[in-house]
Image: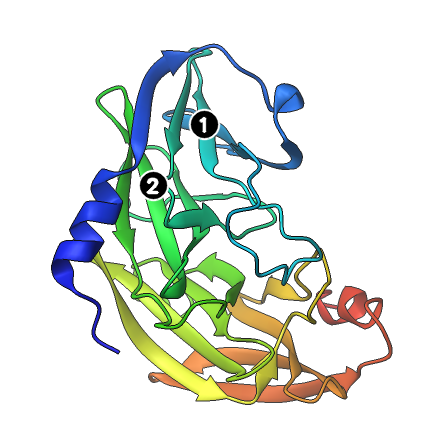
Amino acid sequence: MKIPALLILLTTMSNTALGCEKSTHTEADFPESLSQSKQSEGISSAWYDGGTGRYRHGVLGDAIEPSILRVSDHSGCSYSIELGRPHVYEDIQTRLANIDGKPGAEVVTIRSHQDYGAQIAVYQLAEGSLELLTTTPYIGTSNRWLAPVGIADFNADGAMDIAFVDRPHLAKTLRVWTYRDGTLEQIASKAGYSNHKIGEDFISGGIKTCDGEVIMVTADAYWTRVLGTTLQDSELVSVDLGPFNGTDSFDSALSCE
């Protein structure tokens, strides 16, 4: 589905970014969305705020989603960006990672459009303002979602990658996108995976690093087995880590022992 470029521009311009404020995650609508960075520069923490019911999908258990992303830096200043009406953050938790290789972390989010569904949206703190750095394309249809698996250099090429399951309840496709030259580019995809069930307020699985190899841990498409997947020569290669017998199955799968 081709999305008009003018519409994308207008919806992006409808976002409102604010300069240095004083706020804490404990005062927010979604304090559990907090993530913190171990880096000594730039963004130190990020969280969601501004609950709204304008995007009535409810894939995460209710129809209340964040409309504001807030971050704090190491000086104690907080910055925020509020989405315009077509968008919400259809997400559970913010994710901090150094995507562009420059000092300081960026924030990786799930942003959904009322007509075109979800996308990965990455934000950076630049010159005293929280700004959109890059995105993946929208899925293309309203009420279609994606669930992140993890952020790492999966193929050890020096560039950071973002892995997610595209429509974990429908398409069930694992995709890996890499950040190069200011944009995200898909480098691998394969069907047959899931990491979320409709109505759950959490995403299952994640990533682990064992003997220097980064492994993506998900369920299979039918939620009968737990899979460990690596990126090898642009191909996603999976091994069976055992049966799925409830969420505890992921605990052992995420261990290197």
- Residue at position x 63%, y 30% in the image: 29
Q: Is residue 29 left or right of residue 114?
A: right
Looking at the image, residue 205 lies above or below residue 192: above
Cβ atoms at labels 2 and 1 below 8 Å apart: yes
Give SS at disc 1: strand
Task: Residue 103: name its quadrant.
Answer: top left
Q: Is residue 144 left or right of residue 80?
A: right
The answer to whether residue 107 is seen in the rendering is yes
Visual colour scheme:
rainbow
In this rendering, the count of numbered labels is 2
List x then y, in percent, for residue 197: 70, 71
Residue 123 is labelled as 2
In which quadrant is the N terminus drawn? bottom left
Q: Is residue 104 left or right of residue 23?
A: left
List x then y, in percent, for residue 132: 28, 42
Of 157 and 68, which appears nearest the observer? 68
Looking at the image, residue 17 lies above or below residue 95: above
Amino acid on which the number 2 mark rests in the picture: Tyr
In which quadrant is the C terminus drawn? bottom right
Amino acid on which the number 1 mark rests in the picture: Val
List x then y, in percent, for residue 225: 74, 87
Residue 71 is labelled as 1
